[in-house]
Image (cartoon, rainbow, N blue to C red):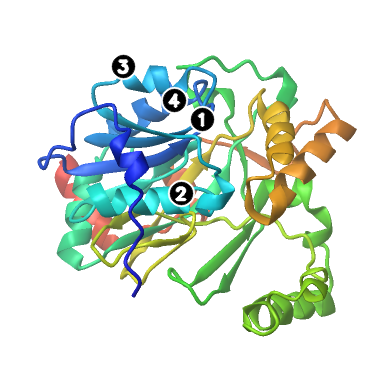
Amino acid sequence: MTTPTRCHVLVERATHRRSSAAAGIRAFSVCRNERLRLPAFLNHYRSLGVDEFLVIDNDSSDGSPEYLATQPDVRVFRTSDRFGEATQGTDWLNALLAEFGVGFWCVTVDIDELLVYPGSERVPLSTLTAYLDRCGYQALLCMLLDFYPAGPLKSSSYRSGDDLVAAAPCFDVGPYEKSSFTLCPSVLLRGGMRERVFYPEFRTRGLWAKIWDTMLYRVALRTPLLRDKAWLRAWRRPTPPCLTKVPLVRWDRESRFLHCTHWVTHKIIAPETGLLLHFKFLQDFHARATEEAARDEHYDGAAEYRRYAEKLSQNPDLTLMYEGSIRFEETSQLVQLGLMQDTEAWAAVRTHRIT
């Protein structure tokens, strides 16, 4: 296995002390102009019991690095290098994880992603990771669940530091499509709000279109002699975002994320699952989509962001709500809806701890 590349430029630009060997759970993230969400992000993970944050700031201009530098449990690493040339930030994260994550449980998430798991309102991450260690599990599979406001996006009035769930409490209960995949954790998840709103043609495709997509993505585009052919890639159908995430990993020297945090080198995956509550969709979404489409630093020439920007330009009053939208209550609701997997073993650990 190839040894992860170390990004010494980032390490040398650190503004805080070296990580304490005593820090039990560490969070890693890439940040670009996330000042609006940073206080809620830090508060959430502190409440779960994260001991230390290592954040790579990619040339923010909204005060994000200055704010992070005032936080005693945050180490800031700054780079002006291109996000796309770092495999959408994956290379930066792998470098920091190799430097500071080996031997620890590491939470690797975007600033707009809040991790939850069965019972997370009452049980800290340290209890979960101790349970995973006892059972021999090395990672927790999660699905990215898009949250959105009850009204038009542009009418959202979220203020930095407020409760994100209160501002954007709604989500789609389904449908979500689960299929096998070659990379760990061996499952590809798609569906939900973004498919419904931004990729409606994908949801309504027929059987032959599904067969064609399967052959193209699982065979032709993975064959070395074919996958780089421009004529073949031109036949790709626009596809909704992958919702598979592996945000919680017991990191070792062989560990490496393979594309963002969607895929990771081989790990023993726990039968329990979590969710990443995704708060991309606030009042700043249209401007951010337009900016990211123009920057062209995201996957596939920022095709996803171009689609967002186009849809919002056509309908500036866009609301993501529909008759099937659900309001969040607690993690037990997500288990009951089938969006998260609980087990008797993990429930017994929680019950014993609480009582």
Question: Where residue 178 appears, x then y in whole percent?
Answer: 58, 67
The residue identified by callout 3 is 70
Q: Amino acid at mark 1?
A: Asp
- Callout 1 touching callout 3 (CB < 8 Å): no
The residue identified by callout 4 is 38
Q: Which mark is residue 134?
A: none
Question: Mark 2 vs mark 4: which is more N-terminal?
Answer: 4
Q: Which mark is residue 275?
A: 2
Question: Mark 2 vs mark 3: which is more N-terminal?
Answer: 3
Q: Amino acid at mark 4?
A: Leu
In three-dimensional space, the C-alpha distance between marks 1 and 2, rounded to whole angstroms, equals 29 Å
Question: Mark 1 vs mark 2: which is more N-terminal?
Answer: 1
Labels 4, 3: front one: 3
In three-dimensional space, the C-alpha distance between marks 1 and 4, rounded to whole angstroms, equals 15 Å
Question: Which one is nearer the viewer's eye here, 154 or 108?
Answer: 108
Question: Mark 1 vs mark 4: which is more N-terminal?
Answer: 4
The residue identified by callout 1 is 59
